[in-house]
Image: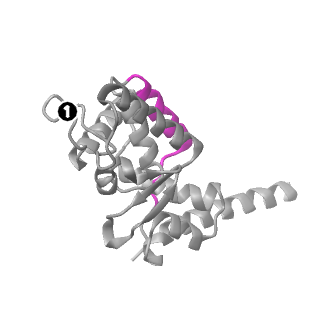
Amino acid sequence: MPDPVAKDLEEEEVLRIYEAIALSKMMLRDRALFSVLLHGLRAEEVCLLNVEDYVNGELVIKEAKWDSKGEVPLTKLGIQDLDAYLGWRREQEGELLPDTALFVSCSNRSQGKRLTYWGIRHVMDDLAEKTGIDLHSHRGRHTFATNLIVKYELDPSLAMELTRHRDVRSFRRYTNRKNKIAAKRAFLKASERLD
């Protein structure tokens, strides 16, 4: 049985999604949410995050699938997006208690309540419709893992640590992707020498 394929987003797709978010009525929340998903968090993990779980530019994952707890460092852009969203929330709500949900719903029915998996799915479905991109929350995780291996050229064991993968077999989709890209690059480089 072949290994599953990484379903990461291309850079151009990520830019299109950010452009669509810029037109959203919940721009700051949706931008922070998408940024966090692009750091490899599962939707269920995002739902469980509290304000106290955002510490020194990292997200502390206390509850996760397969008990894959850990800390996830954020990029400068991720920090900027999350800080902007939390700043806006403080303007709206006043001081945020440590055990307050990090992401809250903005829908009429559940405004101010913890954002649920279905709330995240609704945001992703809306962005998919606006951009024409096949988008779901887990594509952020695929994008993060692929970028760690391909773009940042991290050792797979370090990338597994950051993504909190426990099984080498499930992570192989990302190393396979790197190998395919490296093979194409090597071929193109060799073919230039031959031409």
Rendered location of residue 165, percent (x, y): 44, 70
Determine the image quadrant of residue 125. top left
Residues 60 and 30: in front is 60
Seen at 33% across and 39% down, the residue is 96
> Is residue 38 toward the left or the right of residue 24 in the image?
right
At label 1, the amino acid type is Gln
For the C terminus, the image quarter is: bottom right
> Is residue 167 toward the left or the right of residue 116 in the image?
right
Chain part drawn in magenta: 6-23
Determine the image quadrant of residue 77. top right
Determine the image quadrant of residue 193. bottom right
Q: Residue furthest left?
A: 109
For the N terminus, the image quarter is: bottom left
Rendered location of residue 134, percent (x, y): 36, 43
Q: Is residue 56 above or below residue 131?
A: below
Residues 113 and 68: in front is 113
Seen at 24% across and 49% down, the residue is 117
Say how many tags the image has. 1
Rendered location of residue 141, percent (x, y): 43, 55
* Residue 138 on the magenta segment: no
The residue wearing badge 1 is 111
Residues 32 and 187: in front is 32
Residues 35 and 151: in front is 35
